[in-house]
Amino acid sequence: MKDTDDQQLRPQTSWKLQVHLQNFIFYLLVFGCGLAFGIARTSYIRDISFNFQLDQFSNNRTNTSLSNSSSSSPFITIDRNRTGRIGLEEFLRAPNVSHDMNEEELLWRASMVPRLPNYPFQLVPKVAFLFLTKGPMPLAPLWDLFFKGHQGLYSIFVHSNPSFNGNYTEEEDSVFRGRKIPSKEVQWGKFSMVEAERRLLANALLDFSNQRFVLLSESCIPLFNFSTIYSYLMGSTTTFIEVYDLPGPVGRGRYNHRMRPVIQLDKWRKGSQWVEMDRQLAVEVVSDRKYFPTFRKFCKVSCYSDEHYLPTFVNMKSRKKNSNRSLTWVDWSRGGPHPRKFGRLDITVNFLERLRKWRQCENNGRWTNICYLFARKFTPAALDRLMRFAPKVMQF
């Protein structure tokens, strides 16, 4: 009897197992199809998102103008509808002086140096005139007359107090219009003055055509016409930075012993703030990560870093290539912390002629009486007579 019951239960059990197995296979197939569909849909959505972002990026680059006057990006963008490619001309084009690069970005880009010695294009070398000012340029009309007719051979960069929002001159067509670089506050005798000088150099280095760099102030005047100064600088094989060792409180006395071992006392030097240099030295200055931080940290209070940083830097890095003299004449004969100022009654033909041939000096291994190309400190009251005598004395 028991065997008979077992035989009746076996077909029923076998049938239930088959039903369960079919259900399991069905659910497994449904799950597999759902999983495959989900993977495929996710991949498709990612492709759409990536393609959308890529198209949006390409459209933004295509619609961006290459014009200097409208570009505010630290990187060069190309109008592909106009050029179809990124050419050398676009790569070399310097950004507008009113760019929005921060200090780190500016110095990084300015420190770029080609490894190949020869340029694959015709380079017209320019002189970069770097003006460190407090505000307006009262002698701008004289400089406008100096630069007239020499477009393409010079660049102008002005660093003034950020609080100054006016125009450097009332003349609409002045060469100083629109030449203010992003600036920071500068205090006399403080390290901020060295930072401003380096900021001017960095902005000028963005233009590959700038090969010589001269630092000036709003009270400086040229002593010769543009052609003479341009030829003098471009033909020179040296830089023009005054460097000397001065014992006593205003020389070695300003040295901070905490600068050791980076800067030793026997390497400490002094010199004029008004310097001129070539592109190679300018790149080294903006790339300095050794002496610059040491000066910023330890050259304080009565140290006057603007009189010591570049002379010390050149003494340690580029002494053999330096002429060891400044191209800017200044009168310190009266002593004190500031040089003599010259007003209207001081300006005569004889006075200007004496400045032009002040002394004998060496240039490119030859002796010459053209030693100073610029002079300071001239007040706004001197402008009238300077404009009157410039065509006769300076020949411009």
Image (spheres, rainbow, N blue to C red):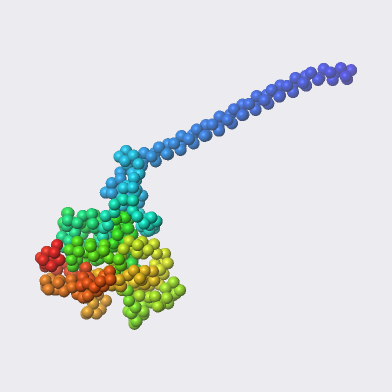
Vertical arrangement, residue 47 with respect to residue 221, above or below: above
Q: Residue at x 38, y 55 (%)?
A: 116
Q: Position of residue 144 (x, y in %)?
A: 17, 59
Note whether residue 184 is visible: no
For the N terminus, the image quarter is top right
Foreground residue, 66 or 193? 66
Q: Position of residue 3 (x, y in %)?
A: 88, 19
**Residue 220 is drawn in which quadrant?**
bottom left
For the C terminus, the image quarter is bottom left
Q: Residue at x 30, y 73 (%)?
A: 324
Note whether residue 277 is visible: yes
**Residue 343 is drawn in which quadrant?**
bottom left
Q: Residue at x 19, y 56 (%)?
A: 150
**Residue 357 is drawn in which quadrant?**
bottom left
Foreground residue, 33 or 127? 127
Is 171 on the left-hand or right-hand side of 156?
left
